[in-house]
């Protein structure tokens, strides 16, 4: 699987990576790789790999099937859906600002991603906050957001992935995130 980072330029505290398949990877599933990132298994190669994500959540569209109990089930369904020829998923990394408690950062990221990815774009999102300092790393706390690039509705993962996996998708997600943060602050830090 191939990837490209920050296609519409560097955004402070908001990194983007899009993943796509080459013809030789056409049937390559995304589930095992994302699950490994959420719950790494020994032997660990790096300190940050040993630090499993603090938790994870699924953010589903309102009309998502009601029988998706776990992230593993969600990713298995995506991998069983008709293969996308190119764009497969996007990953966002949203860094915790200085002075904002970890739990508040998690809440604002969860609410902002639910509003944009799940409710506006009808995409499933997997939110996995990461606290590298717990294992001695100096990297700042951040949240990973994995977004399979196909809408999810009652029939499953169907339809066109839209522009999520493109430079304009990066830019649109950034604009949505900054607008959500401004609104959040204007309401006194309440989503």
Image: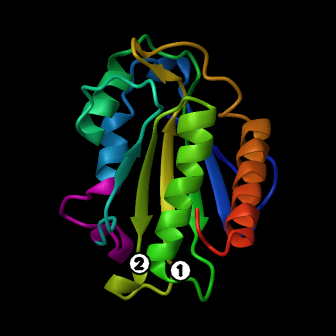
- Position of residue 174 relative to residue 21, above or below, is below
For the residue pair 166 and 44, the one nearer the viewer reads as 166
- Residue 170 rendering spot, x and y as whole percentages: 72, 44
Residue 32 falls left or right of residue 186: left
Residue 80 image label: none
Q: At x 53% / y 55%, what residue is drawn?
A: 111
Residue 166 falls left or right of residue 69: right
Work out whether residue 90 can be spotted: yes
Q: Is residue 62 magenta?
A: no
Q: Main secondary structure of the magenta part?
A: loop
Could you classify mark 2 by the number of other residues whose Cα lies within 10 Å: few (under 14), some (14-19), or many (20 or more)? many
Q: At x 29% / y 26%, what residue is drawn?
A: 66
- Position of residue 68 relative to residue 108, above or below, is above
Residue 140 image label: 1
Tell me the quadrant of the picture where the C terminus can be found: bottom right
Q: Could you say which quadrant of the image residue 33 lies in?
A: top left
Residue beneath disc 2? 132
- Residue 114 rendering spot, x and y as whole percentages: 53, 46
- Residue 174 rendering spot, x and y as whole percentages: 74, 52
Judged from the image, the secondary structure of the residue bearing numbered disc 2 is: helix
- Residue 39 rendering spot, x and y as whole percentages: 26, 57
Q: Is residue 45 magenta?
A: yes
Q: What stretch is highlighted in magenta?
A: 38-50
Q: Could you say which quadrant of the image residue 86 lies in?
A: top right
Outermost residue to the left: 42
Could you classify mark 1 by the number of other residues whose Cα lies within 10 Å: few (under 14), some (14-19), or many (20 or more)? some
Q: Report how far apart the C-alphas of labels 1 and 2 lie in the structure.
A: 7 Å
Of label 1 and label 2, which has the lower sequence position? 2
Q: At x 32% / y 68%, what residue is drawn?
A: 54
Work out whether residue 18 can be spotted: no
Mark 1 touches mark 2? (CB < 8 Å): yes
């Amino acid at each position: 699987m191939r990837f490209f980072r920050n296609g519409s330029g560097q955004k402070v505290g908001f990194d983007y990576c899009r993943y796509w398949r080459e013809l030789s990877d056409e049937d390559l599933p995304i589930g095992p790789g994302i699950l490994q990132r959420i719950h790494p298994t020994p032997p660990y190669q790096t300190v940050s790999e040993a630090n499993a994500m603090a938790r994870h959540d699924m953010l589903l569209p309102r009309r998502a099937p009601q029988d998706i109990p776990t992230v593993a089930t969600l990713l298995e369904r995506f991998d069983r859906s008709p293969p996308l020829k190119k764009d497969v998923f996007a990953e966002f990394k949203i860094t915790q600002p200085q002075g904002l408690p970890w739990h508040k950062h998690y809440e604002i990221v969860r609410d902002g991603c639910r509003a944009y990815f799940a409710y506006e774009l009808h995409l499933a999102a997997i939110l996995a906050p990461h606290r590298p300092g717990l294992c001695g790393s100096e990297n700042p706390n951040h949240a990973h957001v994995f977004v399979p690039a196909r809408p999810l509705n009652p029939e499953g993962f169907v339809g066109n992935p839209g522009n999520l996996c493109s430079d304009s998708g990066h830019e649109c997600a950034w604009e949505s995130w900054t607008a959500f943060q401004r609104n959040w602050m204007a309401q006194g830090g309440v989503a």
